[in-house]
Amino acid sequence: MSVRIATFNVENLMNRFDFSGFRNNLNKDRTLQLFQIVDEQQYRQLEQARTIAHADDTRQLTALAIAETHADILCLQEVDNIGALNAFEFGYLFKMVGEGYRHKYMVEGNDSRGIDVAVLMRDQTRYGEPIEFVQMTSHAHVTYTDFGIYDPELALLGIEPHERVFKRDCLEIDVRIGGKPLTLFVSHFKSMGSPRNGLDGRASTMPVRMAEAKAVRRIIEDKFAQSGGSADKRWVVCGDFNDYRERIIIGGDSLAGFTFEPVSEPLSCLDILLKDGFCENLVERRPVMDRWTLYHTRGPEERHLCQLDYILASPALARSNADAIPDIIRRGQPHRTIFPPKQEVELFPRTGWDRPKASDHCPVTVTLNMV
């Protein structure tokens, strides 16, 4: 028997409007920056119209990307609330896949914008095995002190020991697939943000993600400590970790031709989870040039492809699925994404140069045998 699992950052699946751009220009959409707006009332009207106008195409593309995963269990990041998830599933995803993801699980986490992680499940796998929900545990409450992972680097960022580790959550869900246990750990780590203290956005926020990775590992170790350890259990860690172990630097231009140079990073929060064979990044079974799930650009001077989205398998699952290679769904990427040679795909209809798009991230999906 087998189960197909996917992870996808759906990029701001909201059911509310964000009017903070009226006072904070950094939050103002670029469309509205083109116009003179006389007062907050006019801004709110225009922002509502803009959001609604963009949302339909965007969510059609999001649903198309999800449908292409053919997942039995879907782990999502950047979901506003259960209302937004229900509306999206009924109004968009249902049209692509029919009745399917009837079971939805999420808990409000710690994100200041209110975006959370969520899990959607079918009643049974595509091969007819029942998917049984057992229990759900949130770890949003865990502090640095609780796990003893507070360090001087966090102090330099102004973070206090009593603060919560996870910027969103590490949502733990136990299920049974055809009667066999499987545990999902779904998370969305701290974003890279802007440069700070003379460091770039990735380096300046690295201590937070390192702590989140330590906490995830601790949660897994504690869960299985009384039953012989985690190595022989079935579990996966899924989500957007906002970090990479390697990236592909893009140079050149469309006239002279693009160049693609793979570069390994000396430090990543993923190292904490992967060291000593604690788990395996299944996407690393793909060729090094074909592991990316996000295209990053700040203009021609800063462009790269990297993996931010992960399905990490326990040693037991990795061994019993030695030939399992994840799929990365890239058809929802915008036209501005620069694909390496022979990786170009036919993008979904109505995809724009920058938007609409399914998301800035690509879904990752894999079929795992539950032997």
Image (cartoon, grey):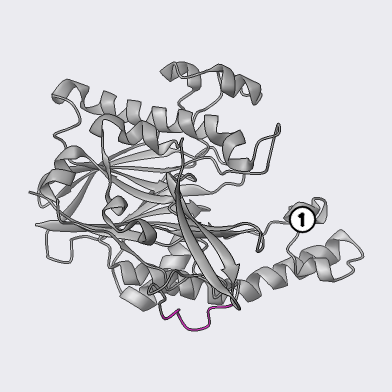
Q: Where is 103 relative to 66, above or below?
A: above
Quarter containing the N terminus: bottom left
| Residue displayed at 36% across by 49% down | 310
Find the magenta span and give its range.
346-352
Residue 260 spot, x, y in % from top left: 48, 62
| Residue displayed at 62% across by 24% down | 159
Q: Quadrant of residue 3?
A: bottom left
Residue 140 shows in this picture: no
Q: Number of numbered discs present? A: 1
Give the left or right position of residue 228, taking residue 360 as reference: left
| Residue displayed at 70% across by 71% down | 50
Q: Can you name the residue that lies furthest to the front here?
A: 256
Secondary structure at badge 1 equals helix
Q: Which one is in front, 267 or 150? A: 267
Q: Which one is in front, 258 or 350? A: 258
| Residue displayed at 42% across by 73% down | 331
Residue 157 spot, x, y in % from top left: 64, 26
Q: Could you tell me what secondary structure mostly forms the magenta stretch? A: loop
Q: Which one is in front, 224 or 44? A: 224
Give the left or right position of residue 208, taking residue 200 as reference: left
Question: Which amino acid is tagged 1?
Answer: Gly
Residue 71 shows in this picture: yes
Residue 143 spot, x, y in % from top left: 49, 23
Residue 42 within the magenta-colored segment of the rendering: no
Q: Quadrant of residue 183?
A: top left
Q: Quadrant of residue 198?
A: top right
Residue 44 spot, x, y in % from top left: 78, 63
Which residue does the numbered mark 1 point to in the structure image?
21
Give the left or right position of residue 91, taking residue 21 as reference: left
